[in-house]
Amino acid sequence: MLSAAAVQAEPPQVVATFSIIGDLAAQVGGDRIDLQVLVGPDADAHVYEPRPRDAMAVARADVVLTNGLELEGFVDRLIAASGTDAAIFALTDGANVLEDPAGGHYHYVGEQAIWHAGAYDPHAWQSVPNAQAYVATIADAFCAADADGCEGYRANAASYALQLDALDAEIRGAVEALPQDRRTVVVAHNAFRYFEEEYGIVFLSPQGVSTESEASAADVAGLIREIRYAKAGAIFAENISDTRLLATVSLTRSQASISDGFYTGNWLGSRSAARPTYRARSGRYGWCCHLRASVSAARGAPEYAGRRA
């Protein structure tokens, strides 16, 4: 039989719904938590189908960290099916959220465009200040589950908040380096309003043109006209999206050309040799790198950030 001290020494069992939340949880919890991430790198939490092992993980959990705002369509039924007694935390509850004027957005799953409905835009972590709000909520969650470790959680959260301050400044500096007329880019997944609102980059998306898996020639022509009118500085392909339409746009000489890279805007990616992190996908190896590509493209055609090996 385990002693009371041994029982107390068991690490809190934490489940994070997807990769970015998992990384933020790891930054706060460190080695003191036992963390399981349901939707890993290069996978889409919008359409994930949970497996039996996910229900088992949630059933054992002390803390379940979700994004909220209906991002993870599977999470409510998974929690109900698991019968868990875990404390459930929706990280957007502490964030500055934006209403979605269209009531949702399209995103690609393989070759299929899928409508994701919602009154509020759930992609709040695209704004670094909102990521800091996520971190603060995670620290609160861990302190509630493990009072003995609270001081460490608070210290980790404060240290990471300083790193996020530096990241925020880095992104702002990269945007400031762009000419005012080169602050428009094209993305596959129309889900970057928080980044747009926070940092002043305008995003165009094929999903705003077509809801079909194959865009028509008229659709492509319309997008090309919009790119030319807005003088889009770069075209970025997402690690979970079908890139063929963006590649087609690039090949039309719509002032768009392909550059090496693959942004991981909504989920972490696994293509980097280093462990994928929120800071890396947003900082010098992520958005900042791609925004600098827009600067270099300012004298010519914008670049397309396509697949990286």
Image (tube, rainbow, N blue to C red):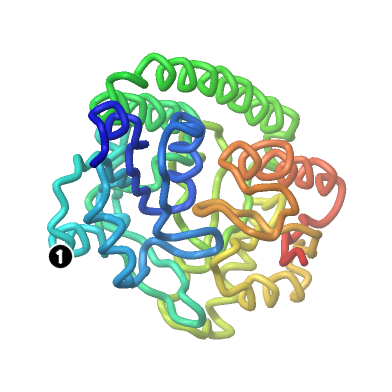
Relative horizontal placement of residue 130, taking residue 148 as reference (left or right): right
Which residue is located at x 23 percent, y 29 percent?
Answer: 4
Viewer-nearest residue: 217 or 292: 292
Viewer-nearest residue: 247 or 263: 263
* Residue occupying the far front of the picture: 1
User: In the rendering, at what x and y percent does residue 24 appear?
Assistant: 47, 37
Asked if one can make out residue 94 in the rendered structure from this viewpoint, the answer is no
Which residue is located at x 39 percent, y 61 percent?
Answer: 45
Q: Is residue 46 above or below residue 233?
A: below
User: In the rendering, at what x and y percent does residue 65 appear?
Assistant: 31, 43
User: In the rendering, at what x and y percent does residue 276 appear?
Assistant: 62, 48
Check the picture and name the quadrant holding the C terminus: bottom right
Viewer-nearest residue: 222 or 77: 77
Relative horizontal placement of residue 44, taking residue 306 as reference (left or right): left
Relative horizontal placement of residue 228, taking residue 86 as reference (left or right): right
User: In the rendering, at what x and y percent does residue 15 appear?
Assistant: 34, 49
Three-letter amino acid code at the position of disc 1: Ala
Q: Which element carries disc 1, helix, strand or loop? A: helix
Q: Is residue 141 above or below residue 87?
A: above
Viewer-nearest residue: 137 or 131: 137
Check disc 1: other Cα within 10 Å, few if <14, some if 14-19, many if 20+. some
Which residue is located at x 68 percent, y 77 percent?
Answer: 248
Report which residue position mark 1 lands on. 81
Q: Is residue 163 above or below residue 76?
A: above
**Number of marks in picture:** 1
Which residue is located at x 61 percent, y 40 percent?
Answer: 282
Check the picture and name the quadrant holding the N terminus: top left
Asked if one can make out residue 263 in the rendered structure from this viewpoint, the answer is yes
